Image (cartoon, coloured by chain):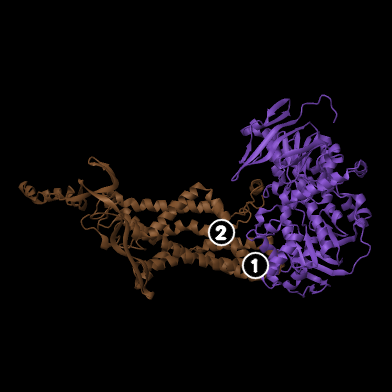
Amino acid sequence: MMQTEPKPNLLEIRNLQLDFRTDEGLVRAVDNLNMSIQPGEVMGLVGESGSGKSVTAKTIMRLNPGNALIQPGSQLWLNHNGQRTDVLGLRGRDLRQVRGGAVSMIFQEPMASFAPAIPLGEQIVETIQIHLGHDRATARRIGIELFERVGIPLPEQRFDQYVFELSGGMRQRAMIAMALSTQPKLLIADEPTTALDVTIQAQVLELMLELREQLGMAMLFITHDLGVISKIADNMTVMKRGEVVESGPADSVLYSPRHSYTRRLLDALPQMESLPEAPAQTPAPLIEVKDLSISYPIAGGAKQGELSHAVRNVSLALPEGQIIGLVGESGSGKTSLGKALLGASPISSGTVQYLGEGGYTLGAKQKAKRQQIARVAQLVFQDPYSSLNPRMTVRDIIAEPLEALKLTRNRKETDARVMDIARLCQLDISHLRRFPHAFSGGQRQRISIARALVCKPRLLIADESVAALDVSIQAEILALLRQLKAELGLTILFISHDLSVIANLCDRVCVMKQGQLVEQGSVREIYLTPQQAYTRQLIGAIPLLDQARLKARESAAVPLSLMAGHHQQAGTCAVSN
Amino acid sequence: MLSAILRRGRNQSTDTPDDSYYTAGQLALIKTRFLTKTSGLIAGTLLASLILMGFFSPFFSPVNPTINGADPDYRRGAPQWLHFADENGFSMRPFVYSYRKDKPKLDLRAMLKNGGGLAALDKLTASGALSSSAQNRFIEDRNQRRYLQFFVQGWAYPLLQIDSLGIDLRWDRHLFGVEQGQVHLMGTDEDGKDVFSRTLQAVWVTVSIAIVALTVKLFTSLLVGGVSGYFGGKIDTILMSITEAVRVIPPIPIYLACAVALSQADLSPVQRYFSIAVVIGALDFTALARRLRTHILVERKQEYVLAAQLSGSSHMRVIWQHLVPSFTSYIIVDTLINFPYVILAETSLSFLGLGLTEPVNSLGVLLQKAQDPDIQQNMIWQFFPVLVFVVLIMAFVFVGDALRDAADPYSERNK
């Protein structure tokens, strides 16, 4: 990127300031943002939720909601076809220039972005007709060509299908085809791969790179995953709370980050060279799963009693006092397996046997008492918002298992137990009177963990427990889980689709595919010497930074004191969040 | 938005730790949000004062609204306006004028002189000189002021009356009145009953009927919707088909049938109407029951309910600790929004002559009069209850609207 006299920028954003009008007054969403994108450039925009990155992207297309207020002094210029357009001044039909004309967008959730009751092809044909003025037949031909180009097999048939008939990866490809149909100069991709499984993510990224080379579009790629950025972006901008904290060529930002926030994001990526050592010996199993199958009755199935098999013949032993990762793509049956250990999935054959004190056995016809299970095994949910009752105080939420199981003699004892566990989960005791709405996602997840641990279970099942959290907060929750395991001797089954999280946390890893256990072993075995083809494919698809260059950065030696400093900062941030 | 509050809260709490927002429960949050809605506040104040005035109507009424308080000397009397000043001087204390009845002289002799006969009689009757409004003309005596007095002694009314316990507290003070005679702020009707006092009493009668109807309705819908939603499956199917069946029955014929059936029973008019209110409520449960069922179906799938179950909570505990609180605010709002409809049902029934009838005071009864051409032409002040009715309904609608916006403080929890 060392052009002396650069071509005119395709997009120029100057001093963009954007507020939201809310009941509580103006809330600043984007603060004084400057950014420019050259033709053919891929700009990565990184930041956590609420950092203003999606708002920025929507402002370019003028898709902001009605309560967004763009402050005077903000400038947004688009240089297109030799014309310099003031995007913020566009009205009415002229808006088509930035909505589909020169700019188009790929959304995070393709399922929600297509009209569900109109065939895909119909939607694309309409777009082409409006923007390029072709007749129907030509538009259809172009559309099918596009489908072929984005790698959708049998494009002519797929073209007339509905969005629900396609798999996740195909949907996102169709979305890309639709975005490309107007031949935009700038493609905005808002977390296009976040909702996809790793292997499909890799395919989609490859496709986007390929298309960019062929078509020479510029791209604004929004993501929170630095691994993805390292694969695709030329330049990058890091945002935090509406402000740009760091920007520049992707290489220099990734391999010599200046801002502590960027460094924290980088630390969340798995480092293949420093995977945790496998524990010396494998302890006796706490819970044993034998030939477990789980099937659900199909809703609206043709025949009564028709079943869909979520898990087939899985045998597994969870060694006591370890963190076991359970990895798989969506639909692989990992959540069903996790819930089966708690007796919350319908077991069709096989058994789950809890071997510790107060043990229970679950099987197709054996049902253990819910209260008996609740004493020894608990679940931490994925969504820290819907899993806490908004109408109860934090104290009441945490005390719920104690009160439901009648484990304490009086209120005083309950309070004491709640306070103990809250301290352990690093919650402020004075916050116990508060309601969940006063807390951020990370703190809510701590509350959720405290609730799970208050009755001193031996087994904790964490179902995608950090998937809804931002990267830096993820790291804190993972550290908390590790610490709790050490202090309480917990056995944790950590279910995740995110291989980086598993690599950073677990002692052992189990890989599931389509309801079956494909491979299991220590983290090092699975990540460095995977045996099965599927595992190899999965591991190979993790977007990672270039290891050699990373080493170079390590040897450049980040001063130890600085590292310590930023960890401390992470801690204070969490409290204030 | 929530993060904005948090951010602001944090800024404030740097030196003064203000925990009130964070420790605010559901009701406190609703209150705070409701207080920011100006239209809701105004309507709420209006509504509260109307209902309070209705509830304590004997105290606020200057005149007994029943036939006992009718003023035979001031039938079909126009409203007596409050004055502060006239050509005789200014007064801090408001006053009304006294009046005397204008006795129109019918010169029957003259009629005879002109030949008499039926043609002359026709002419006399057609001239309107014999109509009741011509017979009840009142002339203000501007030299005779009646000053307004506060906390005057008047007719006695029961403050608290429990027959079974033998408690009968009576009082005879009224908020305002005049030194001599009576004051009719909104005029009188054809029997000489005070329109203002009647309206105040009618507000309470109507609202209390609505409360009965809504209580019955709420109970029925909670039972049907709650059972249906929580247990689901076959019970749900059966209950919901019954609900649908009830829903398609047109209400007016049912009310008619009830009115006829009840007329056989020996009931006082008010008792009769309360029974109709019960019928209205019992038949009106369908919409709310269905909505409650849907609400419970959704709420049951929430993860926090599963979390409670996995924590070892029993069914009863889940229902009482988690599900019931989740829809209380919803019920409050729904009830308030439905208030106008029940009042409308009452008024429309009374209007059709099926509900309450004279001499009972209810808004419906008073509104019924608005169709009388005599009143439309000669006693326009009897439209005062219509005005009160419109204000009451609007107030309910605005309060209900504001409450609906404020009632779900967790609607933006995912933002």
Q: Secondary structure at mark 1?
A: helix
Mark 1 chain: B
Marks 2 and 1 sit apart, C-alpha to C-alpha, by: 18 Å
Residue A465 occupies which quadrant of the picture? bottom right
Q: Is residue A302 visible?
A: no
Q: Is residue A390 visible?
A: yes
- What residue do we see at 75% from left, 74% from top? A368
Chain identifier for the purple-coloured part of the image? A
Among the two numbered marks 2 and 1 on one chain, the one whose residue lies closer to the N terminus: 1
Instruction: Specify whether A416 is left or right of B107.
Output: right
Given residues B382 and A262, the one toward you in this image is: A262
Find disc 2 in the rendering and name its residue. B329
- What residue do we see at 33% from left, 51% from top? B383
Residues behind callouts 2 and 1 on a single chain: yes
Chain identifier for the brown-coloured part of the image? B
Location of residue B260 in the rendering, given as x and y in whole percent from the top left corner: 37, 68
Query: Which label belongs to residue A113?
Result: none
Instruction: Specify whether A18 is left or right of B58.
Output: right
Find disc 1 in the rendering and name its residue. B318
- Answer yes or no: do the residues labelled 2 and 1 have beta carbons within 8 Å? no
Instruction: Specify whether A214 is left or right of B115.
Output: right
Location of residue A519 in the rendering, given as x and y in whole percent from the top left corner: 89, 60
Mark 2 chain: B
Neighbour tally class for label 2: few under 14, some 14-19, many 20 plus, Cα within 10 Å: many
Q: Secondary structure at mark 2?
A: helix
Q: Amino acid at mark 1?
A: Val
Location of residue A10 in the rendering, given as x and y in whole percent from the top left corner: 75, 30
Q: Amino acid at mark 2?
A: Ser
Q: Is residue B366 above or below residue B235?
A: above
Location of residue A343 in the rendering, given as x and y in whole percent from the top left corner: 76, 69
Residue A562 occupies which quadrant of the picture? top right
Neighbour tally class for label 1: few under 14, some 14-19, many 20 plus, Cα within 10 Å: some
